[in-house]
Amino acid sequence: RQGNPQAWKNRKDFGEKTKSIKKAGEFPAVVYGPGVKNISVQVNEKELKKVLQKAGESSLIELLVEKGKKPVLIHEIQKDPVSDKIIHIDFYQPDLTKEVEVKIPLVFEGVAPAEKDLGGTLNKNILEVEVKALPQDLPHEIKVNIDNLKTFQDHILVKDLALPPNVTVIKKSDEIVAQVLAPRKIEEELAVPIEEKVEEVEKVEKPKKEEEEVVAAESEPRQRREETPKKEKQPTENK
């Protein structure tokens, strides 16, 4: 279990009155879970940041409230879109005897020789993975060592991740987590031809050409009729 117990007060102010809570460096939060009565609390922002630095957002932490300690997971953090300050948190109190599914961030460590020595680019395909475990067994991060990416053919798969005991990843084992991509030369990129769908262009131009021919064919007899001089009637002689 991660994090030290924190003494966070039960909340008595709601609605507009929460402004006074925020001025005091605290924000509103709620604790809920299966078979648990919802509890409204107010959290000290500095104290929470200390816990997050130590435990992360995916590990089980303990809240010390008026009725004792409560093991909880951080379910959702709401932040102000402008200041990025925390304005509300949902704490989930799970059943410690049942597994839960939580997303765990990946932390990449080391140096990839294929990137450093061969001029490639490290491509991180997956930044977090969803795992299944008992709440008390959840890690706050999974470390990924990239020192073995020596060539452009090397890669790290989901099945290569070093997982703590009793933790299972909910993802295909053959999915690529990270690899180093080979650099593409400028000459190669310039040499790539621009593919043009000639057939479609011909299909568009052909009906148009036929249409022009039909119009021309229709107008030609008309022009001939207009160009043909009319025969003048000869005056009849009076006998």
Image (cartoon, grey):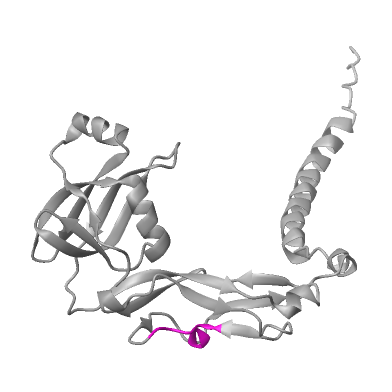
**Along the viewing direction, whichever of 139 and 207 lies nearer the viewer:** 139
- Residue 88's quadrant in the figure? top left
- Residue 181's quadrant in the figure? bottom right
Horizontal side of 46 relative to 67 (left or right) equals right
x, y percent for residue 9: 18, 47
Residue 125, can we see it? no
x, y percent for residue 84: 44, 42
Q: Is residue 226 magenta?
A: no
x, y percent for residue 160: 52, 87
x, y percent for residue 97: 17, 79
In the image, what residue occupies the spot 79% across and 50% down? Answer: 213
**Is 75 above or below relative to 110?**
above
Q: Is residue 159 magenta?
A: yes
Horizontal side of 68 relative to 213 (left or right) equals left
**Along the viewing direction, whichever of 70 and 174 lies nearer the viewer:** 70
**Along the viewing direction, whichever of 103 and 13 lies nearer the viewer:** 13
Horizontal side of 225 relative to 38 (left or right) equals right
Highlighted range, magenta: 157-164
**Is 208 above or below relative to 126?**
above
Q: Which quarter of the figure is the N terminus placed in? A: bottom left
Farthest residue, direction top: 238
Q: Which quarter of the figure is the C terminus placed in? A: top right
**Along the viewing direction, whichever of 213 and 117 lies nearer the viewer:** 117
Residue 64, can we see it? yes
All told, the count of numbered labels is 0
- Residue 163's quadrant in the figure? bottom left
